[in-house]
Image (cartoon, helix red, strand yellow):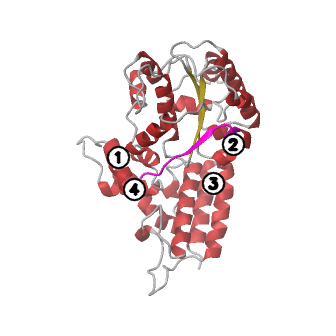
Amino acid sequence: MSTGMGMGTEEATKHSLPLAPWLQTQLRSLLAQRGHAWLLSGPSGLGQFDVALALARAWLCEQATADGACGICGSCHAVQVHTHADLCLLMPEALSLSLGWPLDEKTQDELDSKKRKPSKEIKVDAAREAVTFTQFTRSRGTTKVILVYPAERMNTITANTLLKTLEEPPGAVKFILATEAAHQLLPTIRSRCQGHTMHWPVFDEALAWLAEQAGPEGKAGKKPATADLHTLLLAAGGRPADALERAHAGPSSAVAQHWQALPKAMARGEVGALSDWTPAQAVDALQKLCHDMLATRAGAQARFFSAQDLPLAAPGKGKPAAGPGFAALSAWAKELAASARTVEHTYNPGLMLEALASRAQLALNAR
C-alpha cells in the first residue's frame, strides 16, 4: 500500500499534467454518475490509471467542478505530492516505485536492505491495511478513496480480503479499480463495481496529442517528425500512452526507424534487432509482427507496421501479398503466446533473444 513521505516537485508535476481530451470527456461522464465503486477497464495504453487518479482527485477536492478537481486547493496539492491521508493506493511494490508513489516504512526498509525484491503482485498484507484504512477517521473533507491498479494483479486471497469492504464500505469510502485485463478479476469483484470501458481515441486526434506531448528533441530542440510519430503510434496499436513511452525511449526518428526495419531484420534472423529490448518487449514486438503477417496474408490491413515494411512479395492481381502460409504463421503465433506466459522468468535473456530471432526467421521464410 502506498503511504508515507511524498515525492519531489519534478515527479509531482509529471503526474499532474492535464488529461488528454478523450480522457477528460470520460472523466466528466464518470463524475456525473453516482456510485461508490468504479471498474475502469480496457487494453493497456488507454489511460486507465490517469483517469482513475483524476477521479480520485476530484472526489477529494475541496472545490471540485463537473470537469474535475480544481488543482489549487490543499487537497489537490496533497494528492499531487502523494501525501493525501485520505487516498490509499493499492499497487504492486515495483509499480509504486516506478511511478514515484511512496511505500510504507517497513516495506521500504526491507527493500533498502535487499532482504527481498519489490513484489509484482498486490500483496494481501496491503489489502488488509487498506481495509483498516477505511475504518480510520477522515483527515479532511467528506470522502476517503481506495485506488487499485492494476486490479488484475490481485490474487484470489487479496481480492477476497477486499470483497466485503468493497460491497459495504464503512462511511463515505469510494473505490476505483483500474485494469488492463478485467477477465482475470474474480466475478464477485466485477459484480460489485460499476463498469466503464475506456474509449479508443481517433487516430488523428491521438497523433496530434502525441506531437504536443513528445515535445522538442535534441540540442537543436526540433519537434519530432510527424511521420516518425505516426510510426510510433502504429507500433503501439493506436494506444497514445504506449506511443508516448516509445517516443521518450530515445530520438523518435531512431526509434521509428528501428521499428520499421524490424520485420525484414527478423526475416534475415538478425538477433541484433532485438538486443536493445528485454525478452518481454521482444515477444510483444514479434507478436505484433506475426499478427500483421497473418492479417495481410488474409487480405486485411496491417495494424502495427506499414505494409511496405513487411517481408512480403508484391501481391498479384486480385490476390493478397505472398508470404508464409497460415499454418506456419499460426504455429509461430502459438509459440509466441506460450513464451509470453513465462517470459518474465527467463533463465538466460541473451539465449532467449537468439531463439526468438531464429524462430522468427524460420516462420517468415516458410512457404
Judge left or right: residue 171 versus residue 272: right
| Furthest residue toward left | 220
Looking at the image, do the residues carrying marks 4 and 1 touch, with CB atoms under 8 Å apart? Answer: no
Residue tagged by mark 4? 203
Q: How many marks?
A: 4
Inspect this view and state whether residue 347 appears.
no
Q: Amino acid at mark 3?
A: Met
Q: CA distance from mark 2 to mark 1?
A: 32 Å
- Which circle marks residue 185 in the picture? 2
Image quadrant containing the C terminus: bottom right
Task: Tell me which corner region of the image, top left, top right, bottom left or bottom right, holds residue 3.
Answer: top right
Judge left or right: residue 358 versus residue 251: right
| 124 in relation to 134, above or below | below
Local secondary structure at mark 1:
helix
Q: CA distance from mark 3 to mark 4?
A: 34 Å
Looking at the image, do the residues carrying marks 3 and 4 touch, with CB atoms under 8 Å apart? Answer: no
Crowdedness of circle 2 by 10 Å Cα count: few (<14), some, many (20+)? some
- x and y percentages locating residue 25 in the rendered image: 42, 42
Inspect this view and state whether residue 194 appears.
yes
Between residues 328 and 68, which one lies in front from this camera angle? 68
Residue tagged by mark 1? 209
